[in-house]
Every structure is written in structure tokens, then in C-alpha cells.
Amino acid sequence: MQLRKFLNDGGTERVNVVAVSWTEGRYGDDSPSRLRSMVRTFHPAIRVIRASPKVEKDFSPLVYVPASFIFDKQGKIVYGDGNREYLGTARLTKILDSLK
């Protein structure tokens, strides 16, 4: 999915994007500033949280990274199961429209 384009085209009015820093520091030097810089470059509306035992439990079983999840306003998962499934703009729009 072209997430940056979706966000630039008004998507930030429809979704909040949270990225989980799953592997930062696991396979080399941990660099929070490098991660923040990369996310700001991709899109400044994306918020990053660091993996923790609670985050890992909440997203378990996570099979692939990256994986997409969509939650409704009450926090109930409406899309995603930890697999790397393509989420195109048309499908995302349909899911978001169903939440109205």
C-alpha cells in the first residue's frame, strides 16, 4: 500500500498510524534518532512505539513484520492477524468506510 500517498492525500483525517519499533536494536546498534528521522521523512504523522513484553503480547501472534492492523475507535481489531497481507488503498478505504 502506498501509505505515504494515502496520508498525504488526507488520510491523516481518517486514521492514526502507529509503527511498532520491533527490531530496532535487536540486530545491531539501537538508534532512536535514526528511527525518528526515518519516520519523519516517511510521514510526520506516524507515531512510533517501542516493543515491550506488553506490546508483543497485545500483537501476538505476530507472524511477519511489517504487518498491518486496523482498530476501531473502541480498540477492537477489525483487520489484521499478524500476516503480511497486502492492504491497498481501495481495501483500506472500504474498511474505513465500514467503520462510520
Image (tube, grey):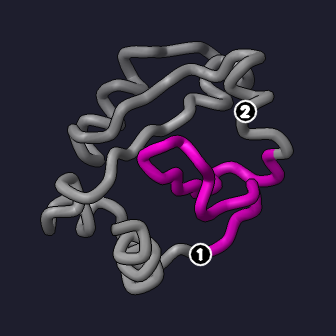
Q: Which residues are magenta?
A: 62-86
Q: Magenta region, mostly helix, strand or loop? A: loop
Point out residue 91 in the picture as x, y percentages from the top left corner: 46, 82
Q: Which numbered circle lies on residue 58?
A: 2
* 31 in relation to 12, above or below: above
* 30 in relation to 9, above or below: above
Q: Residues within 10 Å of mark 1 (few under 14, many from 20)?
A: few
Q: Which numbered circle lies on residue 3?
A: none
- For the residues labelled 2 and 1, the Cα–Cα distance comes to 21 Å
Point out residue 64 in the picture as x, y percentages from the top left corner: 76, 53
Viewer-proximal residue, 77 or 37?
Answer: 77
Residue ID at (70%, 65%): 84
* 24 in relation to 40, above or below: above
**Residue 84 falls inside the magenta stretch:** yes
Type of residue at label 2?
Answer: Asp
Label 2 with label 1: CB-CB less than 8 Å: no
Residue ID at (38%, 45%): 17
